[in-house]
Image (cartoon, rainbow, N blue to C red):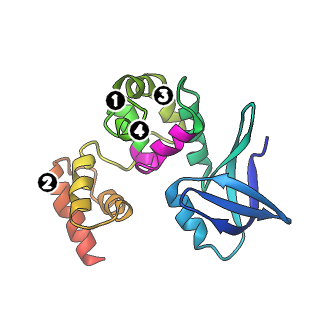
């Protein structure tokens, strides 16, 4: 099993990077966000990896953090969810947001992935809800009503990353979505 790679990025695409490790180039499938970050790296990088062994191929999937890799491995442990579907799910939102949605039983993120319908999304929630707390301390940093706030910020032209970071700065005692959005907009305006 190849658990981790350390090397320089010699090429990259929308959802992959080729990592040069001592003269050997490893094709590593990644999330779109990781591919963008890796494309900007000029120094040596470390990727946590999962090796998917198939009858006709050996595919490496790489992640910037061990937590992302653990989340990916939990997703593929669900019957019917393969590595490509798991990566597509991870391309939707940050792991913290997806974990929070699964814990709360919210299937809306999961059904946005092509090939994952309501039944598959419910199966993921049922099988992983209790396991999600092992990814961290259960504190995800994303409030349950933030899906609407993120959509509103996206419609105003902010990126998902900017929206998530702004909403993380909102005090947890503010529960109303409108007030959370207002606070996030003030944060974005000051930044």
Q: Which secondary structure type mostly characterizes the magenta part of the structure?
A: helix
Cα separation, mark 3 vs mark 1, equals 10 Å
Residue at 75%, 56% (x, y): give it: 26
CB under 8 Å between discs 4 and 2: no
Comes first in the chain, label 3 or label 2 = 3
Pinpoint residue 92: horizontal percent, then vertical percent. Answer: 41, 48
Comes first in the chain, label 3 or label 4 = 4
The quadrant where residue 190 appears: bottom left
CB under 8 Å between discs 3 and 1: no
Comes first in the chain, label 2 or label 1 = 1
Numbered tag placed on residue 128 in the rendering: 3
Cα separation, mark 4 vs mark 2, equals 31 Å
Numbered tag placed on residue 105 in the rendering: 1
Q: Quadrant of the C terminus?
A: bottom left
- Provide the residue designation for mark 4: 114
Residue at 35%, 59% (x, y): give it: 160
- Provide the residue designation for mark 2: 178
The quadrant where residue 120 appears: top left
In the rendered structure, does residue 127 fall within the stretch colored magenta? no
Disc 1 secondary structure class:
loop
The quadrant where residue 77 appears: top right
Cα separation, mark 2 vs mark 1, equals 22 Å
């Amino acid at each position: 099993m190849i658990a981790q790679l350390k090397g320089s990025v010699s090429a990259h695409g929308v959802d992959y990077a080729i990592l040069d490790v001592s003269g050997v180039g490893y094709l590593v499938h990644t999330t779109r966000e990781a591919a963008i970050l890796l494309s900007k790296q000029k120094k040596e990088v470390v990727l946590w990896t999962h090796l998917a062994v198939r009858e006709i191929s050996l595919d490496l999937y790489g992640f910037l953090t061990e937590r992302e890799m653990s989340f990916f491995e939990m997703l593929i442990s669900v019957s019917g969810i393969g590595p490509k579907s798991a990566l597509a799910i991870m391309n939707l939102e940050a792991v913290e947001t997806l974990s929070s949605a699964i814990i709360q039983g919210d299937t809306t993120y999961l059904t946005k992935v092509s090939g994952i319908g309501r039944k598959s999304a419910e199966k993921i929630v049922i099988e992983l809800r209790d396991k999600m707390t092992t990814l961290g301390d259960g504190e995800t940093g994303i409030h349950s009503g933030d899906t609407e706030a993120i959509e509103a910020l996206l419609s105003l032209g902010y990126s998902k990353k900017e929206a998530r970071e702004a909403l993380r700065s909102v005090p947890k005692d503010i529960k109303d979505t409108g007030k959370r959005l207002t606070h996030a907009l003030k944060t974005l305006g000051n930044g």
